[in-house]
Image (cartoon, helix red, strand yellow):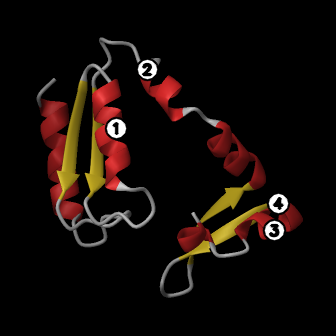
Amino acid sequence: MEERLGKDFERRINEDGFIDVKNISGNVEYRVTKESFMDRRQTDMKSAALSIPKNCRVLTIHGSKDEVIPVTDAFEFDKLITNHVLQVIDGADHCYNFNQNELASVVLNFIKSS
């Protein structure tokens, strides 16, 4: 998280109540509030994955070069979720900056396959 939010993100989120996450150009991409950060931090992802109903189709798309969430996390979810399709997009980063067409294609194919 430190690489995405900055070295002192916990101090800043406690002092300010939020962190603005900026892109390479310095523009704000999104805001992380203290409440949402604490909620995410306390979520047991394994329990959450196991609570998904078996008849619910789930698509996970993950970039192989994701710098925020390791691709290994996607493989772990794949083991836990019953009706799951995992698509790893080779070379894609967390925001799919150079893989928008492939991302859209994967989503459309999943929707059409229902």
Q: Residues within 10 Å of mark 4 (few under 14, many from 20)?
A: some
Query: Along the polypeptide, which appears first: circle 1 or circle 4?
Result: 4
SS at mark 3 in the image: helix
SS at mark 4 in the image: loop
Q: CA distance from mark 3 to mark 1?
A: 31 Å
Q: CA distance from mark 1 to mark 2?
A: 12 Å
Which residue is disc 2 drawn over? 50
Question: Which numbered disc, 4 or 2, marks the residue closer to the eye?
Answer: 2
Which residue is disc 1 drawn over? 76
Using the rendered image of the protein, determine whether residue 29 is visible from the camera's viewpoint: no
The residue at 17%/35% (across/down) is: 110
- Please state which of residues 103 and 91 is positioned toward the viewer in this rendering: 91
**Is residue 23 positioned above or below 61 on the image?**
below
The amino acid at mark 3 is Arg
Which residue is disc 3 drawn over? 11
SS at mark 2 in the image: helix
Query: Along the polypeptide, which appears first: circle 1 or circle 2?
Result: 2
The amino acid at mark 2 is Leu
**Is residue 29 positioned above or below 45 on the image?**
below
**Is residue 14 positioned above or below 36 on the image?**
below
The amino acid at mark 4 is Gly
Q: Which mark is residue 17?
A: 4
- Please state which of residues 90 and 95 is positioned toward the viewer in this rendering: 90
Q: Residues within 10 Å of mark 2 (few under 14, many from 20)?
A: some
Q: Position of residue 39 (x, y in %)?
A: 69, 41
Q: Quadrant of the C terminus?
A: top left
